Amino acid sequence: MENFPMEKYNTFHVAVNSKYFSEFDSDESLYEILDFMETNKLSHLVLGGGANILFTKDFDGIVIHPVSDNIVVDGDIAVADAGVVWDKLVETTVSMGLGGLENLSLIPGTVGAAPVQNIGAYGVEAKDSILWVEYAGVKDRKLHRISGKECKFGYRDSIFKHELKEEAVILRVAFKLTRESEDYPYNVEYGALRAKVSELGGVSISNIRKATIDIRSSKLPDPAILGSAGSFFRNPEVAKEKLDGIKSRFSEVVYFPLENGNYKISAGWMIEKTGWKGRAIGNAAVHDKQALVLVNKGFATGQDILRLSDSIRHDVENTFGIILHPEVIIL
Ligand code: EPU
């Protein structure tokens, strides 16, 4: 389809057009799209739920959108197609008594997008369960399978954002799960999650799912109602000296130690501290319940949201000497 309106295909609900738009529901239909792309020398963008992207202008290429939606569970391994809605996979596996994804309940987006940015929440990341990823090579039109290790996962990062950025279209992902049993390694490190789970009557994967859904719904906007892409910025990593400098001025700074000796500082806390929480520039606003989340209150353009993000970055840099980096992909 040509000159395709993208408003419904990005959770910020920004109204831009894509020159071409094509869906695939099988490996074969994807290879046909890749042929078309090559013949017409088009640049491409693979877009799942559009839950981590900010369009600032029309896209002058082809948007490729997976709609393949099979989930096959064999023993403790679940293989899901790229087009499966992420939370559908979590719901399915949890309801079968298979744990691993319960802390990742209600994250917007699709299975194909999960490995790209290594989605994470409440002490768990997709990488903890990903066994392998299958993708189609854009140039060689071959099916490739790489292991979780080969995906080079990092904090909201993977090989699919670097070496394989233009080269891979993810077809399906396999997850190694764990059947719930007495010695199942529940992850309730996150304080609010632990509290909510005990309110629900004790720890189980289905209670972790319920509690996660509760916490997310209370802090994060439902993109179907209020446009957003979840956290807009990453939590920055700093060395101890930098943190100590900030601590001497703000003893209440929120931070987490990392294994490499550095610290992650809460970007949401810094944004709140600079007075941006709940503030808006036109229709682009900072969410009033979580300052790391930017929202579209109505008809904001991508440029409006970018302007808001620039103002926030400017103030955070002036106050803390830290440059915030977007977590969302800005196009
Ligand atoms: N905080 C504030 N003010 C705010 C927001 C946060 O002071 O407005 C402080 C609070 O002390 C809070 C702490 O920061 O306790 C941490 O906040 P939260 O637990 O909401 O987590 P986050 O670091 O802001 C990250 C992820 C989220 C994920 C949550 C929970 C990133 C970029 N974001 O946010 O992921 O859901 O942890 O694990 O790492 C996403 O990536 O889109 C996303 C929503």
Image: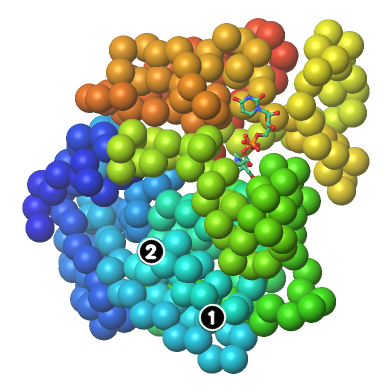
Q: Nearer the viewer, residue 166 or 272?
A: 272
Q: Is residue 37 left or right of residue 234?
A: left
The amino acid type, in three-letter code, at marker 1 is: Met
Residue 108 in picture, x, y percent from top left:
43, 52
Residue 157 visible somewhere in the drawing = no
Q: Residue at x 15, y 44 (%)?
A: 5
Q: Residue at x 72, y 14 (%)?
A: 320
Q: Nearer the viewer, residue 301 or 76?
A: 76
Tag 1–tag 2 contact (CB < 8 Å): no
Q: Residue at x 72, y 63 (%)?
A: 203
Label 1: element kind = loop
The amino acid type, in three-letter code, at marker 2 is: Val
Residue farthest to the bottom?
75
- What residue sits right under mark 2 in the picture? 85
Q: Count every numbered label the image shows and give the total.
A: 2
Disc with the residue nearer the chain's start (1 vs 2): 2
Residue 280 visible somewhere in the drawing = yes
Q: Is residue 66 left or right of residue 142?
A: left
Q: Nearer the viewer, residue 330 or 275?
A: 275
Q: Residue at x 90, y 41 (%)?
A: 261
Label 2: element kind = loop
- What residue sits right under mark 1 in the picture? 96
Q: Is residue 306 left or right of residue 247?
A: left
Can you tell which of label 1 and label 2 is closer to the viewer?
A: 1
* In the depicted structure, whether residue 278 falls above or below residue 232: above
